[in-house]
Amino acid sequence: MRAIVCELVAAKRVVMRDAQSYCAILLDDNNRRTICRLCFNSPKKKYIQIPDGNKEMARVNIADVQDIYAQAVRLKEAVRVYIAQGTGCT
């Protein structure tokens, strides 16, 4: 994830926080700045959830972890929303 959004924010600002049912990727370790959620608990059902403009989590099924790169535009847009909100992003 850091490799995808590092052109927008410093890589050290992108933090992973593990939860029981998903792994959250957050900006500045703030759960109100979710970049995405990774759901890999089931070997047959892997998906990524990315917030849209309304902060609803859009679900994208993936077959392999590398499929995350196909969602780069959406992930960067999630970070841009936080930049536009004035979260101190540089």
Image (cartoon, rainbow, N blue to C red):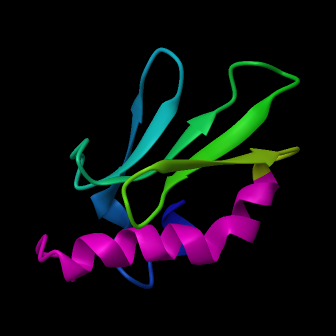
Snapshot quadrant of residue 87: bottom left
Residue lying furthest top: 20
Quadrant housing the C terminus: bottom left
Q: Where is residue 29 drawn, in percent x and y?
A: 24, 46
How would you classify the magenta stretch by its main secondary structure? helix
47 sits left or right of 19 in the view? right
Q: List x then y, in percent, for residue 37.
A: 51, 42
Q: In the rendered image, which quarter contains the N terminus?
A: bottom right
Residue 51 spot, x, y in % from top left: 46, 55
Residue 55 place in picture, x, y as percent: 37, 55
Question: Quick check: is 4 in the magenta stretch?
Answer: no
What residue is shown at x 81% (from left), y 47% (from top)? 62
Q: Is residue 77 magenta?
A: yes
Note whether 54 is above or below 34 in the view shown: below
Which residue sits at x=76%, y=34%? 46
> Is 56 placed above or below 39 here?
below
Task: Please state if 56 lies on the left or on the right of 15 as rendered.
Answer: right
Residues in magenta, as a range: 66-90
Residue displayed at 23% across by 47% down: 32
Total marks drawn? 0
